[in-house]
Amino acid sequence: MKVIGKILLTILLLLLLAVVAVYVLAQTQWGASWISRTLSQHSDYQIAFTKLEHNFSDPSHLILDNASFGLKTQPATVVAKKIDLGLSSGQFADPLHFSSIWLENGTLNVTDNGKPLAFSADRLQLNQMAIDSPGSKLPVAARRVDGGIVPWKPQAGDFIGSDASFQMSAGSLELNGVPATNVLLQGSINSNQLVVSNLGADVALGSVTGSAQRDAQGNWQVAILRLNSIRLQSDQSLSNFLDPILTLPSVHFDRIDVTDARLEGADWAVTDLDMALKNITLRNGDWESNDGSLSMNASTFVNGSLELNDPIVNLAFSPEGVALTQFSSRWVNGLIRTSGHWTRSDKKLTLDELAVAGLEYTLPQNWHDRWMARLPDWLDSVEVTKFAANRNLIIDINPDFPFQLTSLEGNGSNLLMARNHQWGIWSGNVSLNAAEATFNRVDVRHPSITLNADDNNINVTEMSAFTKSGMVESVATLSQQPQRALSLTMTGREVPVDLLHDWGWPTVPLDGNGTLQLKVQGSLAADKPLKAGMNGTLSVTAGDKTLQQTMTGGQVAGAQ
């Protein structure tokens, strides 16, 4: 029996010695290399670390130095100077589930697709880590990340898992191309429902704070979003800049507050922007709201050739449409002010009052093309219930027929300025007059025009102007049908007999002042040249000389 006891004791000592030897060798560089190589050969993962550490003063922790881990067919998912694996009694039932995993000084590469990580933990702790997800739907690059996920159970396409709480901070972060610093993020995920209870970051020399949640279908509800003193520059146009927001599947904003923001992009900018947006849902390029509102003001707003100074906008949203309770702005050295409403059912914008004063406006060279262009789908018609103009300067520098109206004033009522997505004067009344005007190098004084429009015609009931020593008066009718049939009668008394030369009529072989009468019929159809469709007669009397001329197809027989 003593011999058997000695043999058993010897075997136990040898086993203990072997265990000690393995324990010691495992913590050497050679042991770490052998373990890494063995695990990599017998799994789908590439695993490497330079040293394995264990301390009996803290027996529930294994530490891997200079470790990397990932699928063999992909870049390493985790690269860290230190990985601390917290062990527990549950390790025997689930060897790959740890009490805690600590990642320190390394990089975490996250993807939306591919095989999920085999590891999980009651807690994942990050310390001074970098996170990259360049191939994700929302690319993220974060540096100096500290934080934790409890519990951490990654799934395919979901690194955090479907049921976890998280809290993270990052020294710097770039989200979908937008950089931020000093980022704080707190929230949770429950059955694929994401709750961001606290978000804070320094962005574009300003700060962003907020809270939001996303349901399992991907719909967002933003409880609050505050942007303060943002200074953002972009190389995108305004429409491209807004596209990511306007094309979201669904996002509801309870409230957005913007304070003292300055934004600049390709051919657009806004300075000193203050905005409050409440209770609105954006979904697939459209919006919905019950009792929503928008209040906005800025120092300047520039979009292409449009520049507004001190614009103020107040809107109220409802299922029926938008109430424009206030819009005012300084524009081209003058003031524009209006209020009204847009209705969703007929896509009609009704301006209860439109007032313009003191403008010094030069028409863009393509103003005629803009006038003929089709309006967007959301705007079918525009009606101005009351219109007033005061002391405006309007200039057109088109070399074919330049003109200028000085101190232009006027008023109008019930003006239907657009119908079926097309600009025009479709109904209503308007009267305009100016102190002075120049039409293609012909100077006149006190020009005025009065017209009314209905579904059939635009009727110019009075059009007159004073020349240097005489007066011109006209009446006209323009059809509202596509052929745009025009009938015009003009009478001039004590006017230069060559008055009409610069307005398109050939030179008449008379001199001095006289009396003239012009009658013209033609077509202003959009797809036809103007001159070729004109027919008419001109009668001129100067002293004892009288001249009759006839125009056919824009040509006067025998004219110079």
Image (cartoon, rainbow, N blue to C red):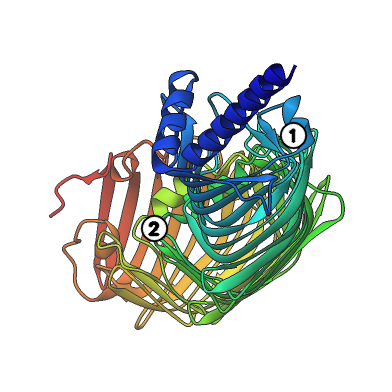
Give percent across and percent down for residue 175.
Answer: 53, 52
**In x, y percent, where is residue 290?**
86, 50
* CA neighbours of label 2 inside 10 A, class few (<14), some (14 to 19), many (20+): few
Q: CA distance from mark 2 to mark 1?
A: 37 Å
Q: Which numbered dot is residue 162?
A: 1
Q: Residue at x 28, y 45 (%)?
A: 551
Any part of residue 157 in sight: no
Q: Is residue 196 above or below residue 466?
A: above
Quadrant in the picture for the C terminus: bottom left
| Secondary element at image label 2 | loop
Could you tell me residue 186's position as x and y percent?
A: 73, 56
Chain-order first, disc 2 or disc 1 = 1
Numbered mark located on residue 235 in the image: 2
Q: Nearer the viewer, residue 111 or 240?
A: 111
Residue at the spot 81% in from the left edge and 48% down from the top edge? 289
Question: What's the residue type where badge 2 is placed?
Answer: Asp
